[in-house]
Amino acid sequence: MSFRAVIIGVALVMTLGTGTASAQNPVVVMETSLGSITIELDQENAPISVGNFLQYANDGFYEGTLFHRVIPGFMIQGGGFTSGMSQKPVRAPIKNEADNGVSNARGTLAMARTNVVDSATAQFFINHGENNARSLDHSGPGAAFGYAVFGRVTEGMDIVDKIASVATTRREGHGDVPVEDVTINSITVQ
């Protein structure tokens, strides 16, 4: 076999491998008011975050919640508020898995939290920009602990881009809120 054939074969395997979900990783489809987003969850590197997210999804918790914080080039955040910026009651916070080595790159899904390291509940965000450069990745204890990446968009980044481009305002004491609601209609496991 020639060197060229080996290189083409390796390139083909790499190309085919990047777009498919790993056998052990769950895949979900998030239906939003602006379109569908398919997400592969990273069970191996973030089992606590994935389990938490799937429990909320399977319970129907996300149905009718909003993308309530939208900052183009940074992220779109959702999963905790309904229309009128009413916050939904949540389960207990989970352990932060930001030290799992997975970076907050464009198109990845991460757990939202307060300044308390282990405070993530239901809210998540999709990185619209390369946010590893914005100190969202794990770099030590305290506030620098980072935000746990637990999935990646495999289809629908055009929908993420569309959501990131909506007009925003201040509402009910919150900034960067879409003027017109961007709703999560459902999240279903494939």
Image (cartoon, grey):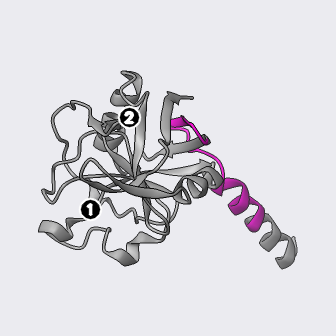
Q: Residues within 10 Å of mark 1 (few under 14, many from 20)?
A: some
Where is residue 58 shown, x and y percent of the image?
40, 23
Q: Is residue 37 left or right of residue 150?
A: right
Q: Is residue 117 above or below residue 123?
A: below
Could you tell me the amino acid type at mark 1?
Asp
Q: Which residue is mark 1?
A: 99
CB of mark 2 within 8 Å of CB of mark 1? no
Is residue 12 magenta-colored? yes
Q: CA distance from mark 2 to mark 1?
A: 34 Å
Quadrant in the picture for residue 89: top left
Q: Is residue 7 above or below residue 156?
A: below
Where is residue 162 shown, x and y percent of the image?
60, 54
Could you tell me the amino acid type at mark 2?
Ser
Q: Which residue is mark 2?
A: 83
Q: Residues within 10 Å of mark 2 (few under 14, many from 20)?
A: some
Looking at the image, which residue is at 40% across and 31% down?
A: 62
Residue bounds of the magenta highlight: 11-34
Task: Identify which residue, 166 or 8, lies in the foreground.
Answer: 166
Quadrant in the picture for residue 116: bottom left
Residue 44 makes an appearance in the image:
no
Looking at the image, which residue is at 82% across and 69% down?
A: 8
Mark 2: secondary structure? loop
Mark 1: secondary structure? helix
Is residue 122 magenta-colored? no
Q: Is residue 163 above or below residue 137?
A: above
Looking at the image, which residue is at 40% across and 57% down?
A: 169
- State which quarter of the image contains the N terminus: bottom right
All told, the count of numbered labels is: 2
Task: Identify which residue, 118 or 65, lies in the foreground.
Answer: 65
Where is residue 119 shown, x and y percent of the image?
17, 48
Of callouts 2 and 1, which one flags the residue occurring earlier in the amino acid sequence? 2
Task: Identify which residue, 58 or 44, lies in the foreground.
Answer: 58
